[in-house]
Image (cartoon, helix red, strand yellow):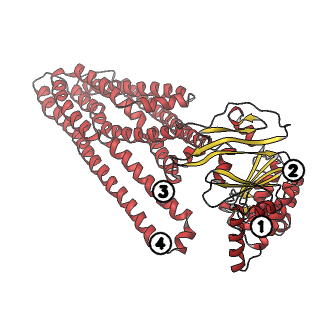
């Protein structure tokens, strides 16, 4: 039986150690109570058959006192195990969420959201049930069994030896059937995670599913995942059915012994009637562990698999927390020096080099797949370059404290994410002490104030998941207000207007222009017409900067930028757009 995952819980949650010791003490008290109760019953019964016995009433009161004490112990034990289960499972959830939040993006992208949720819900639920219902029995039942057998030897060693011949056979059978439960249970949890993954994909891509009539395919995929859980669940049920069969046999067979053999011993005068009654009563302390322990072991195996899945999440490497905070007084804000990066084996960036000077607006353009978005991910430290380095204020990014480095940057992407909560909370994200005047000032600069005050609750308007009750342009302007409120000296814009209609784009672009006027800005441009006035335009292709200059200069060179611009101009003309 593997105890390492359980013991690690008490290392991760040291406050639970005190309650574990209390539970252990209660376990000992409950274990001792069975022989004590058996002895009181033996003496009570024998006093009935002893003429003139004077201690019968005292024995009754002593037995009642033991019963009351056991009731109090059971009540207290339930409270203690509830505390261990709730705090234990809660601590594992907290550590798992903390790991997810502090995990590098490069690793986080490899773990499916459905699998993350499955570990935080299904696996944590299994552990909570185990800690509350099974953990106490897993240790108290063997103790009660050992003490019970010792007392049975005291009553009659012959009947006890006969009983002990049966015990190894029953233990062998229950162990044989309970051992595979951990593996089967772990596989079932993985199948349940696959179901969550499938649901997450279907719901997350609901618009795509409907637009491409993929309902049938998604349902088939979901049905296949559910069918796999059913098959695995039936395997687990079959195994537990065998365990239950052994449990029933373990509970009934031992009672035949004192009724048959013990009755004969009373007839021949070997033992007293009270000893037979005590033997029958004590068999509960032996047979109950035999019948209950296999299920507790089965639950332990399931919990072990759940522990290990959560520990896998908790043990994932975290983003580094070390580093320094440097001065931001330099003229050169950001530099990429000979940066090379690959997600797998194929390089995306190949010796990329450029710099951003204080107060200038630089645009990064290039064909699809050229590596524009990857540049941003490397600049903010989501990914580390395999070669070269990123310098922030002339200091390598790896020497910076990441949190401090990111406070120097405000990033706005085309895929705007808004949290459930009020508009004010989303603008002042992470700063609950922000004043309404500061929030409104940021919204005004982002061209968002006008539509916000027209909403039913204004700045207290509650957003649905991902801001679904706002239009794309409204969501983007709130995202801009959030970046303005952050007041970072460096602004990174990742195709912030590419998914908007003409009017929304005009409002957002106007807000972007106002932001850029007081900051150093690096913008990935999808619509080249929006970056004509950029101080510099960097053209990236194949992971390298292949052209650099102002809009008109690049057009005159007749290179890649001119090709991209004319191609887009032609496409916008055909669709009625304006270049």
Please report whichever mark, 3 or 2, sits nearer to the chain's N-terminal start. Answer: 3
- Direction top: furthest residue: 154
In the image, taking residue 80 as reference, residue 3 lies left or right, namely left
Q: Residues within 10 Å of mark 3 (few under 14, many from 20)?
A: many
Taking the spot 33% from the left edge, 28% from the top edge, the residue there is 142
Of callouts 3 and 4, the N-terminal one: 3
Disc nearer the start of the sequence (1/4): 4
Is disc 4 placed on a helix, strand or loop? helix
The residue labelled by disc 1 is 529
Q: Would you name the residue on which mark 3 appears?
A: 197
What secondary structure is marked by label 3? helix
Q: Are marks 2 and 4 in contact (CB under 8 Å)?
A: no
Question: Percent from the top left, x then y, of residue 1?
Answer: 34, 31
- Residue 400 or 266: which is nearer the viewer? 400
To which residue does mark 4 refer? 215
Q: Position of residue 451 (x, y in %)?
A: 82, 68
Give the quarter of the figure containing the C terminus.
bottom right
Q: Residues within 10 Å of mark 1 (few under 14, many from 20)?
A: some
Relative to 106, say whether 362 is above or below. Answer: below
Horizontally, is 578 left or right of 87 in the view? Answer: right
Name the residue located 34 percent from the left edge and 42 percent from the top edge: 183
Mark 2 or mark 4, which has the lower sequence index?
A: 4
- The disc placed on residue 435 is 2
């Amino acid at each position: 039986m593997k105890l390492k995952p359980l013991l690690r819980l008490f290392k991760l949650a040291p406050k639970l150690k005190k309650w574990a010791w209390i539970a252990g003490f209660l376990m000992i008290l409950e274990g001792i109570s069975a022989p004590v109760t058996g002895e009181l019953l033996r003496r009570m019964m024998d006093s009935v058959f002893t003429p003139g016995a004077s201690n019968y009433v005292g024995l009754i009161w002593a037995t009642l006192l033991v019963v009351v004490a056991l009731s109090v112990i059971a009540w207290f034990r339930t409270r203690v195990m509830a505390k261990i289960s709730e705090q234990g499972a809660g601590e594992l959830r907290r550590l798992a969420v903390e790991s997810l939040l502090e995990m590098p993006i490069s690793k986080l992208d490899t773990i499916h959201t459905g699998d993350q949720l499955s570990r935080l819900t299904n696996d944590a639920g299994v552990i909570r049930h185990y800690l509350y219902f099974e953990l106490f029995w897993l240790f108290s039942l063997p103790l009660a069994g050992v003490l019970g057998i010792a007392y049975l030897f005291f009553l009659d060693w012959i009947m006890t030896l006969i009983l002990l011949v049966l015990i190894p056979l029953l233990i062998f059978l229950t162990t044989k059937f309970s051992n595979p439960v951990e593996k089967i249970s772990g596989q079932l949890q993985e199948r349940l995670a696959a179901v969550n993954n499938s649901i997450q994909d279907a719901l997350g891509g609901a618009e795509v599913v409907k637009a491409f009539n993929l309902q049938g395919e998604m349902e088939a995929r979901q049905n296949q995942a559910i069918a796999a859980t059913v098959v695995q669940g039936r395997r687990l049920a079959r195994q537990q059915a065998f365990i239950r069969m052994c449990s029933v046999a373990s509970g009934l067979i031992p009672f035949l012994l004192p009724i048959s053999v013990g009755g004969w011993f009373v007839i021949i005068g070997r033992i007293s009637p009270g000893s037979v009654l005590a033997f029958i009563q004590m068999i509960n302390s032996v047979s109950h562990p035999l019948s209950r322990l296999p299920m507790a072991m089965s639950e332990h195996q399931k919990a072990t698999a759940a522990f290990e899945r959560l520990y896998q999440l908790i043990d994932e490497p975290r983003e580094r927390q070390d580093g320094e905070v440097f001065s931001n007084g330099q003229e050169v804000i950001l530099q990429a020096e000979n940066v090379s990066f690959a997600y797998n084996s194929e390089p995306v960036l190949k010796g990329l080099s450029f710099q951003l000077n204080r107060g200038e607006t630089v645009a990064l353009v290039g064909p699809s797949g050229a590596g524009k978005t990857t540049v941003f991910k490397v600049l903010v430290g989501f990914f580390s370059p395999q070669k070269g380095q990123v310098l922030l204020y002339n200091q390598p990014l790896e020497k910076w404290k990441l949190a401090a480095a990111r406070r120097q940057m405000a990033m706005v992407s085309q895929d705007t994410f808004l949290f459930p909560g009020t508009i004010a909370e989303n603008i002042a994200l992470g700063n609950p002490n922000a004043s309404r005047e500061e929030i409104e000032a940021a919204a005004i600069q982002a061209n968002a104030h006008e539509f916000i005050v027209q909403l039913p609750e204004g700045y207290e308007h509650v957003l649905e998941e991902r801001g679904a009750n706002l239009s794309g342009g409204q969501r983007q302007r709130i995202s801009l207000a959030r970046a303005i409120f952050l007041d970072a000296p460096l602004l990174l814009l990742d195709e912030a207007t590419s998914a908007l209609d003409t009017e929304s784009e005009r409002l957002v672009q106007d807000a972007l222009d106002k932001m850029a006027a007081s900051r150093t800005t690096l913008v990935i441009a999808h619509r080249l017409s929006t970056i004509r006035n950029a101080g510099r335009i960097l053209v990236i292709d194949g992971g390298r900067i292949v052209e650099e200059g102002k809009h008109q200069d690049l057009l005159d060179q007749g290179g890649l930028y001119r090709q991209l611009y004319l191609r887009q101009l032609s496409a916008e003309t055909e669709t009625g757009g304006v270049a």
